């Protein structure tokens, strides 16, 4: 790709000011439309050292309202970032609707050229990391995020010239590092790395724009032209979608399923139980074992994600309590997931879960999770059919990225039958200490049991993968369910450790 960039291009000063004035006014107007339509915009700048990324970022910000953008310098990797999956530090900074997020060095360069956030064992699977990147960008783009990726390309001679100019000035000398000089010395090697990166990470739904940057004025014009053009196209498209939305009928599409979905839950026997003596003995034994494994996880810097999904009143809370009773409270967090807030709704639906992913050596337990997209949001019509169908693959891709980092994933579906749920609902209604656990929403969900059953079967079929399988827990007996979860977590951790 780099061989197609004409580095000899230039523009005279008068032409530059005339064209830039028009482009800046247009960008100033477009940002208002972006905010009005709630379009999230990501702009990434990658390229050679001293290619002018900082200059272009500053120039791009001049017409923008400072309340509507955030700039993220991603050059240095903090210890906290190093202890999480590679894409985490970018995912948590993706913008809400109506805002611009500008990244000085993106996930693309970091993955292919090298990044301190990527572990040694991951570097052996760079093709996998590139697949994660393409999936990450596609998820954002499919949800309505406009992503613009710019690579600033300069010649070896121009880079050397800029380095020398920076070193002449005592105030700018610090900006040229040994790493920069090494890049210029091994220009051809880096050229091949960059070209490879552009090809690998430009093969998906988000393409690269290579900007010849030997001439700073022509580089600025090219950047503004592409930015204004893409924003104009996106604004026009969203306005049409907004007008068509009112007439689009999606009624009852939320309950459709794929034709090949097996009825997984119908084959689950819910008669399993344990005696009080068996339960007490195994509980004490397993909790002690879990405690020891928790310390081992910390020493080996392995993180764990445990997901609890299940029917209302299936016993998730009591199960989590028994799982964590003997764990060091400094080593785990329980994340109860409720309906998304206004801020969370303005982001991609996975954003709020990315924020809660554990750092290495810690455990995150989710009481309900990202699977709400393919259950509650699907059944209740809170997302479109296209969105929940797309989510199966998006969730699998996210979990694969977690696994690539080394995260251990345990997913439990707490299964009870309809009669047992009714019995537990009634018991809660009769107990003043438990009445807070039952509300109108629980009864409404119960009325939609068949629709939820269809969604759950499809979820289990489509998202139980080799790297993150589901465990269906027979939970009519709370004692049996608690022991089964403890046993499965122990077996999984022992295998991984």
Image (spheres, helix red, strand yellow):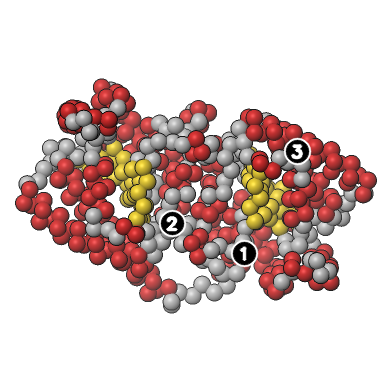
| Disc ID at residue 290 | 3
Does residue 267 appear in this view? Answer: no
Residue drawn where x is 40% and y is 31% of the image: 114
What is the CA distance from the residue labelled 1 to the residue labelled 2?
A: 21 Å
Taking depth in this image into account, of 414 and 426 the one nearest to the observer is: 426
Asked which quadrant contains residue 247, the reply is bottom left
Q: Image height check: is 440 above or below 55?
A: below
Q: Which residue is mark 1?
A: 376
| Number of the front mark, 1 or 3 | 3
Q: Quadrant of the C terminus?
A: top right
Residue 73, image x and y in percent? 36, 42
Q: Residues within 10 Å of mark 3 (few under 14, many from 20)?
A: many
**Along the polypeptide, which appears first: circle 1 or circle 2?**
2
Residue 147, image x and y in percent? 36, 52
**Residues at marks 1 and 2 touching, judged by CB atoms closer than 8 Å:** no
Residue drawn where x is 41% and y is 55% of the image: 95
Q: Residue furthest front?
A: 170
Residue 367, image x and y in percent? 67, 54
**Along the polypeptide, which appears first: circle 3 or circle 2?**
2
What is the CA distance from the residue labelled 1 to the residue labelled 3?
A: 32 Å
| Disc ID at residue 142 | 2
Q: Secondary structure at mark 3?
A: helix
């Amino acid at each position: 790709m780099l061989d197609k960039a004409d580095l000899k291009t230039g523009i005279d000063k008068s032409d530059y000011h005339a064209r830039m004035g028009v482009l800046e006014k247009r960008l100033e107007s477009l940002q208002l439309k972006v905010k009005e339509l709630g379009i999230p915009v990501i702009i990434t700048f990658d390229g050679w050292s001293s290619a002018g990324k900082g200059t272009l970022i500053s120039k791009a910000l001049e017409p923008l309202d400072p309340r509507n953008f955030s700039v993220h310098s991603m050059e240095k990797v903090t210890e906290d970032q190093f202890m999480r999956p590679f894409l985490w530090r970018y995912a948590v900074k993706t913008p809400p609707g109506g805002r611009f997020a500008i990244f000085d060095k993106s996930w693309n360069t970091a993955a292919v050229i090298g990044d301190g956030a990527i572990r040694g064992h991951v570097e052996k699977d760079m093709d996998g990391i590139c697949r994660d990147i393409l999936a990450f960008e596609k998820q954002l783009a499919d949800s309505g995020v406009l992503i613009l990726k710019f690579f600033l390309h300069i010649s070896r001679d121009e880079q050397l010239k800029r380095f020398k100019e920076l070193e002449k000035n005592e105030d700018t000398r610090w900006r040229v590092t040994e790493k920069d000089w090494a890049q210029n010395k091994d220009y051809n090697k880096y050229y091949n790395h960059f070209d490879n990166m552009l090809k690998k990470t430009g093969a998906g739904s988000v393409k690269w724009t290579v900007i010849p940057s030997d001439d700073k004025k022509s580089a600025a014009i090219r950047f503004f032209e592409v930015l204004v053009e893409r924003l104009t196209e996106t604004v026009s498209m969203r306005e049409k979608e907004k007008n068509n939305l009112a007439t689009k009928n999606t009624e009852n599409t939320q309950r459709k399923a794929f034709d090949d979905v097996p009825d997984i839950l119908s084959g689950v026997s819910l008669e399993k139980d344990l005696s009080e003596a068996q339960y007490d003995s195994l509980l004490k034994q397993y909790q002690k074992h879990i405690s020891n494994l928790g310390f081992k996880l910390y020493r080996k810097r392995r993180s764990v994600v445990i997901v609890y999904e299940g029917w209302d009143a299936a016993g998730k809370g009591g199960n989590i309590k028994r799982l964590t009773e003997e764990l060091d409270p400094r080593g785990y967090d329980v994340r109860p997931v409720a309906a998304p807030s206004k801020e969370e709704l303005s982001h991609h639906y996975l954003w709020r879960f990315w924020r809660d992913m554990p750092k290495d050596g810690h455990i995150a337990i989710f009481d309900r999770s990202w699977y709400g997209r393919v259950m509650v949001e699907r059944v209740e019509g809170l997302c479109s059919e296209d969105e929940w169908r797309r989510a199966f693959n998006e969730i699998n891709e996210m979990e694969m990225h977690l696994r690539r980092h080394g995260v251990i994933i345990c997913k439990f579906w707490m299964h009870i039958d309809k009669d047992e749920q009714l019995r537990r609902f009634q018991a809660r209604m009769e107990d003043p200490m438990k009445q807070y656990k039952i509300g109108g929403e629980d009864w409404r969900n119960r009325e939609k049991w068949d629709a939820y059953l269809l969604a759950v079967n499809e979820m289990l079929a489509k998202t139980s993968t080799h790297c993150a399988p589901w465990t269906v827990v027979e939970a009519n007996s709370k004692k049996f369910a608690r022991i089964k979860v403890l046993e499965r977590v122990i077996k999984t951790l022992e295998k991984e450790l």
